[in-house]
Image (cartoon, coloured by chain):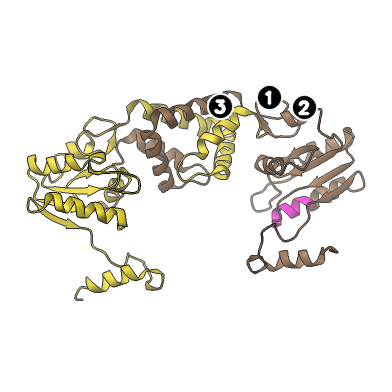
Chain colours: A brown, B yellow
Amino acid sequence: MNGGTDIDRLIDLMSKLPGLGPRSARRAVLHLVRKRALALQPLVQAMTTVAETARECLTCGNIGVTSICDICTDPQRVTGELCVVEDVSDLWAMERAAVFKGQYQVLGGTLSALDAIGPEDLHIPRLVDRVRTEEISEVILALNATIDGQTTAHYIADQLDGQVRLTSLARGVPIGGELDYLDEGTISAALRARSTL
Amino acid sequence: MNGGTDIDRLIDLMSKLPGLGPRSARRAVLHLVRKRALALQPLVQAMTTVAETARECLTCGNIGVTSICDICTDPQRVTGELCVVEDVSDLWAMERAAVFKGQYQVLGGTLSALDAIGPEDLHIPRLVDRVRTEEISEVILALNATIDGQTTAHYIADQLDGQVRLTSLARGVPIGGELDYLDEGTISAALRARSTL
């Protein structure tokens, strides 16, 4: 009865997006219907464009509008440093931090026995290949500090052992973090990796 | 650097939807780009259809695909009971509860001195008119239990005083609610309106 099947169908599709549930989908759709010219039509336009233009970078796996992405083709970027991330969203997060000036390899997930995801389901062979063929001096493993992320990091470390300098992101108290809200693992890692003032 | 301006623009538009922020918009857009055939194209299609067909019911203010909505034209529904709600989303919430069998009047908001919203900005004149011209025996004020909602309820009660039976939703402990998590106002209202077992 949510005002016709067309609207119900849109709510249903919206509610399947990550981060949205039925309630937020209803709110979003009502907003879109009310702001048809200002919100709905530009959104349809932008989605149509993205549906036509978006593609995965053949080198690193980033999502962009060209077959080789802006980062891989940028002559300003250092070519010897390769940052390995699980997902495109992690690559974007690294870029927002604007501190890494090298290039990336997106894995497309993590190894997971539970979900039957093995090395060949990820871009690990491509990473190994790049390390062999490109002049890479350092591989930075920027994987999530989760069980699956760390399992994957260990597997990659095994594969690349001795071929290149391997590093990973530091573990510690996040900026603005309060000890009381941190888990014991983080506090213990931060203590072990403590630095001199 | 989020992979091209087209994608950035889509993320920007998505992040303006209620309930979505920049982070959830990025996640949703990545999901859409990956599931182009399964998620993005059906969504574009559904949005295009809704952009063409959705309209506000001329009688009650519900959003549907016809100029008079399904509820207003449904011969099964009781015509003498009018439920007044702030917003279309509240009407949909009432319909999900599937207990009210009468008709609705959507106000389109609440009176608000702060936002300079007066009675003429809402569908209050239409409500008063319907009570005068239709055979309404009861007006149920199903407005939110907020300051603005209650101010609006009082204003409507003044306008309709003596013309019709006026009721409002009961205040009390919500189903599944725990006293420890409820505010004092609700507990006090629930105690005052206590019922005999």
Whether residue B118 is visible, yes or no, is yes
The answer for how far apart the CA atoms under marks 2 and 1 are is: 10 Å
Quick check: B24 above or below B34?
Answer: below
- In contact (CB < 8 Å): disc 3 and disc 1: no
Q: Where does the image place residue A28, in percent across and percent down from the top left?
A: 42, 40
Viewer-nearest of labels 2 and 1? 2
Residues indicated by labels 3 and 2 sit on the same polypeptide chain: yes
Residue B76 x, y percent position in the rendering: 15, 43
Query: Mark 3 to mark 2: distance in Å?
Result: 23 Å
Residue located 73% across and 67% down the image:
A187
Query: Which quarter of the image is occupied by the N terminus of chain B?
Result: top right
Which is more N-terminal, label 1 or label 2? 1
The residue that label 2 is drawn on is: A73
Above or below for B119 versus A36: below
Residue type at mark 3?
Ala
User: Does the magenta run of residues contain B44?
Assistant: no
* Dots 2, 1 in contact, CB < 8 A: yes
Which residue does the image show at 14% across and 39% down from the upper left? B75
Query: How far from the left and from the top, in percent, is residue B96?
Result: 30, 50
Q: Quadrant of residue A186?
A: bottom right
Left or right placement of residue B171 versus residue A82 in this view: left
Name the residue type under label 2: Thr
* Disc 1 target residue: A66
Q: Amino acid at mark 1?
A: Thr
The span shown in magenta is A146-153
**Which residue matches tag 3?**
A51
3 or 2: tag closer to the N-terminus? 3
